[in-house]
Amino acid sequence: MAEDAKARWTFQWKELYDEVIDSGLCTGCAGCVIACPHDVIGYNHAPGEYIPFHLEEELGLDDCVHGQKGCTSCTRACPRFRDWETEADRHLFGRSRQDDEMSGVYKDVLLTRAVDDAVHELGQDGGLVSAILIWCLDNGVIDGALVSHLEGGDAGRAAWKAVPAVATDRESVLAGAGSRYTYSANTLALAEAREQGLESLALVGMSCQTSIGPVMWHRKVGKVGRPIKLNIGLLCSKSFDDAIFEELFWAKYRLPKEEMVKMNIKGVFQIWMRNGDYHEVNLKECHAWTREGCNFCPDFAAEHADISTGGIGKYSDWTLTVVRTELGRQIIMQMLEEGVIEGRPGDSDPDAIALMHKLSAKSRARWPTWADPTARAGLPASLVG
Ligand SMILES: Cc1cc2nc3c(=O)[nH]c(=O)nc-3n(C[C@H](O)[C@H](O)[C@H](O)COP(=O)(O)OP(=O)(O)OC[C@H]3O[C@@H](n4cnc5c(N)ncnc54)[C@H](O)[C@@H]3O)c2cc1C
Ligand code: SF4
Ligand code: SF4
């Protein structure tokens, strides 16, 4: 943003509603909710919803009294408003992404996994994310993490309802290990972390959530998220509406969610049941339950995280690890040195890296041509349509 543009930032809920929410660009990341100093943005963390709305109706649902008086926090926090990608890139990397950097700017790619068997076993892929959180808590890098748990804890496991949560020790980190493929706006756990007096946090979130911090800093509302010191991204091509459990897995395949113990996506939707049964559901069939907020999402590779993590590649119990910032590099190097995680070079699975770039391009092609063009920059001709 140029100096004069900064001075002219007058955009408020009215513009956010019109350009992001009503247009369909909104991912439901809840960045605007945590940034609103007047607490007038509501959010239902509920099936079929996951979208912000205005709590005051004086000016209708698409305008804001505080915005009319000059408040602009919500648009400043939104990682889908106008040229969010360049702004976050500049904040994090001091430059914009080049056309050939489909998966965003990064320093290193490697494969990692937790050395601790329990962490590795509970983790979705290599258990890297949980290992980082535990190591950072043990070493005073953070005093808490914004993660996702299942509602009701272990007792509520049967409902498979992912909710934002705060983790402050090994036990609460491991309670969140593994992936749920429904949405959890982990940013919303910031309020609880503040209540607990926590000051140095890690945010774990899908790509859409990892751009919030850098965008906020660039647009001068960074202090809202100041406690978030470390940004861990989950590679992501989509999340599903909660209704998929009833309307597909149960209605068609008679798979009760109470009996599911783990799920993963590797070309197919994989489901493991308590009795040891294993099922695969064709991903094409699942598409009808894609959460609405994902339809236009251009970021597969969590391009604004310190460390982005995914499960693609031939080594299924390793985490594909994309190190983007100096902080991310220091943490991974130190953990490797201390033997908390083991690593192998990304080059040992070049197809995984190629697939990441391919899936990144595919996601970028979803970003509509009527929106700011930067997220589509560099798309191969085959995807420009
Ligand atoms: C919705 C979703 C879609 C994904 N899609 C892909 C993909 O297409 N390709 C790919 O390579 N990788 C994808 N991933 C990432 C992958 O599943 C793993 O999360 C990642 O590889 C890290 O594995 P790990 O073993 O290191 O993490 P773990 O140690 O298992 O830690 C996982 C962390 O993710 C958090 N988490 C779990 N579910 C959610 C959720 N629903 N919302 C927010 N946070 C959550 C947990 O709180 C935990 O801290 C996706 C993840 C999610 C949640
Ligand atoms: S994308 Fe995130 S910050 Fe932007 S309007 Fe939607 S929920 Fe709010
Ligand atoms: S595809 Fe993933 S990163 Fe994008 S909006 Fe959906 S949940 Fe967020």
Image (cartoon, rainbow, N blue to C red):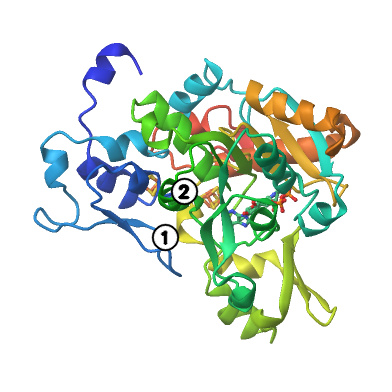
Q: Mark 1 points at which residue?
A: 50
- 200 over 326 or under it: above or below: below
Say which element carries label 1.
Answer: loop
Q: Where is residue 340 in the image (x, y as percent from the top left)?
A: 83, 38
Q: Where is residue 177 in the image (x, y as percent from the top left)?
A: 69, 56
Give the residue displayed 65% in from the left and 50% down from the top: 169
- 89 over 47 or under it: above or below: above
Q: Can residue 83 be seen in this view?
A: no
Nearer to us in this view, 15 or 100: 15
Q: Position of residue 324 (x, y in %)?
A: 65, 27
Say which element carries label 2.
Answer: helix
Specify whether 104 is left or right of 190.
right
Nearer to us in this view, 138 or 101: 138
Give the residue displayed 50% in from the left and 53% down from the top: 294
Q: Local crowd at mark 2 within 10 Å, few (<14), some, or many (≥20)?
A: many
Q: Can residue 138 be seen in this view?
A: yes
The amino acid at mark 1 is Tyr
Label 1 or label 2, whichever comes before in sequence order: 1
Dot 1 beta carbon under 8 Å from ligand 2 = no
The N terminus lies in quadrant:
top left
Locate residue 140: give its quadrant: top right
Nearer to us in this view, 174 or 15: 174
- 288 over 11 or under it: above or below: below
The numbered mark at residue 193 is 2
The numbered mark at residue 39 is none
Give the residue displayed 44% in from the left and 53% down from the top: 192
| Residues at marks 1 and 2, CA–CA distance in whole angstroms | 21 Å
